[in-house]
Image (tube, helix red, strand yellow):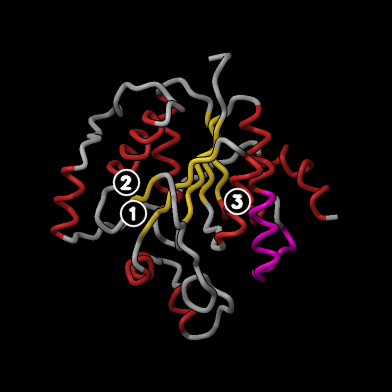
Amino acid sequence: MGDQRGFVVWLTGLSGAGKSTIAAGLAKELQSRGYPVEVLDGDEVRQRLSKGLGFSRADRNTNVERIAYVAKLLAKHGVVVITAAISPYREARERARHEIGDFVEVYVNCPLEVCAARDVKGLYKKAIAGEIPAFTGVSDPYEAPERPEITVFTDQETPAESVARIVQQLEAMHYIRGGGCRGGVSSSYAAVQARQRQASIETWPARSHRGRLLTLAEACCIMLES
């Protein structure tokens, strides 16, 4: 796929909403179709590219800028980049959209109480108790997207259904060729609507390890610290 058009799928949502799980599933689906894919996971970026940054509004925005910078570099060379980061502030996401250009925003929508129930690390409990300051959704705001390209409802859909809907949108936007999701994944929204009526809640599996290009990208991001 030498003429592959690179683009960025930007997953945003609360901690525990399912961004990393969807990112892993979407990456697997696109790779199975022959697309070069890299995932930039918010936790890994914090550990590798954004050491020293705190959780003030300015530092959070700087973190998003670094993710956008690396994503743009990869997309420029034909890579499909999937970012999975809370990226809580609307203004920072809009700057990323402007910087990247080929940008598909996916709002991973999940009620706060469901995210807290999924939190095996107990971060929400600590945040509510005041032990973690500036925690998104508790003591710091999350600004939901106003006009995302797609919204998935992870308290009502399975990860496979969310991935299928994103793939369907990417096909409709002509970022990828049609062909239907593999592995028995249905792109029909009827199943999703049924789940919405039942209001079932699924506990999602732990995130996988990704981002093998982050080490190389560290050097690129050093310049952003000045």
Q: Tell me which corner region of the image, top left, top right, bottom left or bottom right, holds residue 153.
A: bottom left
Task: Please say if the residues under marks 1 and 3 sit with CB atoms less than 8 Å apart.
Answer: no
Q: Which residue is mark 1?
A: 204
Q: Secondary structure at mark 2?
A: helix
**Residue 116 image position (x, y, % from top left):** 38, 70
**Residue 143 image position (x, y, % from top left):** 50, 65
Of badges 1 and 2, nearer the viewer stands 2
Residue shown at 19% from the left, 59% from the top: 200
Q: Which residue is mark 2?
A: 159
Mark 1–mark 2 distance (CA, rounded to whole Å): 8 Å
Mark 1–mark 3 distance (CA, rounded to whole Å): 19 Å
Name which residue type carries label 1: Trp
Q: Residues within 10 Å of mark 3 (few under 14, many from 20)?
A: some
**Residue 124 image position (x, y, % from top left):** 45, 74
Residue 219 located left or right of residue 29:
right
Q: Tell me which corner region of the image, top left, top right, bottom left or bottom right, holds residue 17.
A: bottom left
Q: Which mark is residue 44?
A: 3
Q: Secondary structure at mark 1?
A: loop
Task: Please say if the residues under marks 1 and 2 sit with CB atoms less than 8 Å apart.
Answer: yes
Q: Is residue 189 above or below residue 49?
A: above
Q: Is residue 207 magenta?
A: no
Mark 3–mark 2 distance (CA, rounded to whole Å): 21 Å
Return the residue nearer the eye: 170 or 223.
170
**Residue 73 image position (x, y, % from top left):** 68, 34
